[in-house]
Amino acid sequence: MKEMTVKEMEKLHGRHSKPLHNISLKYKIAMMTALVALVPMITLACLMVFFYNRAIMERGNRQIQEGIKIMSDRISAVIDNGTVCSNNFTISLSSYYNDRTMKEVTRESRILAEMGQDLLIYRGISSIVFLDDEGLFIASDPKLVEVEDDIRNSEYVSLLQGTNGKTILMDAENNPMSREDKEVITLGKKVINTVTGASLGYVLINMDKENLIESAESEISYYFLFDNKGYCISKDEKRDVLESGELQGKIYNGAVLRYDNETYLIGKKEIETYHWTLVGITNINKFNVSGEELRFIMLITSGVAAALLLVSIFLSVTLITKPLIVLHDGAEKISEGDMSVRFHFKTRDEIGQLGRIFNYMTERNRELLIQVDEEAKKKREYELSLIQEQVKPHFLYNTLDIIIMLIEMSRSREAARVTQKLANYYKNSLSGSEEIISIEREVQITRDYLDLQVMRYGDKFKYSFDIDEEILGCDIPKMTLQPLVENAIYHGLKYKEDWGSIEISGKVGENKDAVIVVKDDGIGIDPARLISMQDILKRGEILEDDEKKHFGVYSVDHRIRLYFGDEYGINIESIHGEGTTITIRVPMEKK
């Protein structure tokens, strides 16, 4: 069998091993070093960022909750002022309407003066509107007179008609008294005469939307005020965060909002009295300015540490793996048969010692190879000589048996002819000392042998040769065809009742080898014996029990293998009762 080189073994092993095992030692050391160094560094950095961000979130959350509480108290105070204002205004109106001596013009001027006074007293109120049941309309803001009809026909008035004088916070959306330059929140109250209990009209207290939350806004925090229907009451320059309905849902339900590549911390508080919700938002990205600086410092530090680590890994790995690569390349050359390789390491460490051990092993292997080669050559010559010495007398014994039988049958003339043929046969087969002859000469030897056998079994078989001239000059071991022809006669044709034949043909095979076929139509080989013969040829050795049965077949196959290699030899095919075919393969080129 052909020996595998180091590269071939590596490739074969690589097909069945895990991918990690195929990585170079240099990269394994680098990965392990980087893993040991980088994991603690990354872990420390992650923990620092985690705890810092958590502290920032807690600080931001406290700030937004404190701001929401202050803001909600302020909004409640403004609305409470509006409620007190509406109650006091109702008392004043009752006194004006119960004074029968007061003229209507005077009453209107008194009411307007009362409105002006209340605007000064009650903080957060921007305007007051009064509508009496007899069609009187008075507003502290002259611009509201222009929308008198809208106010009278609004839902505000319809809603107040069914009340009993309680101050009500009106719906903030679609307020008829809001303008583009000034949006308001309205408290409404049905005015009841405190003496008679009769309805006098309706008072509307307007509060500026912007005034409700603007004082609490800062660069990083701002607030949104929602009514009980989810309508945003507040108005500021940063309302674009509410343009998406999805974002509004996150503001109502979540604690953290990510919008436009920034992170917002959300806090909210319900103003229970009026069922409003105040939402405070803090921009963590702007709040966490020191966190950005910390991350920058960590990034620079980590980058410098990683660069130094890579340099140290490269230097250390190179010092270790460079001599190993030299050992690897030298081992490959040794595996390919170059025993002149020697390693010259100046270091006295483990790798230097390994190199000196390699040198010793290489020298010992070179000496052993020379010794083994010489011993193998002697063994081969001895084995061939032994086999050939066994083949020659084997044929002689059989031929002498023929002569003896002819003499016993008083066929002396035929015995003399056989003796003469035997002499010619041995003159051809034994002339010269070479053991490798041409196929042409081997055919002639076999033809002489068959002539001898036809003299004995002239009524049993005939033979024919059909050999292409192209292979006649090819080499073949002497006495290759004769033992096979002898087996065909003694084990195939001899026991056949009728006439038999032996056909010997030769041609160039598919693999550009010389192929010779010995075919007979004898009784064939029974399956059990055929398996035994094929097993002998397969294992390449004959056992003591098989020596007498299959010596001729084995000797032919073994000599061909010894001379030309294991890829050559013979193959047997047989059908019991029909015949046997033996195929011989030898190289076309001389070896």
Image: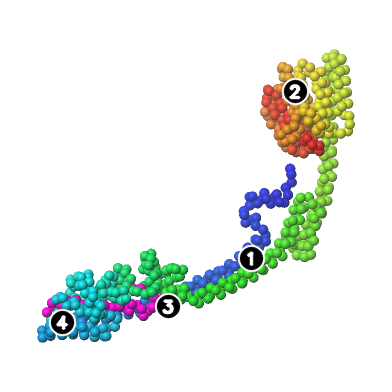
Q: Which residue is mark 4?
A: 94
Q: Nearer the viewer, residue 418 or 547?
A: 418
Camera sees residue 549: no
Real-space CA distance between mark 1 and mark 3, rounded to the nearest whole angstrom: 47 Å
Question: Magenta segment, which residues?
Answer: 196-225
Q: Looking at the picture, which amino acid does disc 2 mark? A: Ile
Quadrant containing the N terminus is top right
Looking at the rendering, which quadrant does residue 19 occupy? bottom right
Q: Which residue is mark 2?
A: 502
Nearer the observer: mark 1 or 3; the answer is 3
Going from N to C along the chain, the mark reached first, 1 or 4, is 1
Point out the residue furthest to the left here.
Answer: 100
Q: Residue 505: within the magenta?
A: no
Asked if the residues shown at circle 3 and circle 2 are in contact, with their CB atoms under 8 angstroms apart, the answer is no
Looking at the rendering, which quadrant does residue 544 occupy? top right
Real-space CA distance between mark 2 and mark 1, rounded to the nearest whole angstrom: 77 Å
Residue 564: x and y, percent?
Answer: 79, 37
Residue 479: x and y, percent?
Answer: 82, 30
- Disc tally is 4
Real-space CA distance between mark 2 and mark 4, rounded to the nearest whole angstrom: 147 Å
Real-space CA distance between mark 3 and mark 2, rounded to the nearest whole angstrom: 113 Å
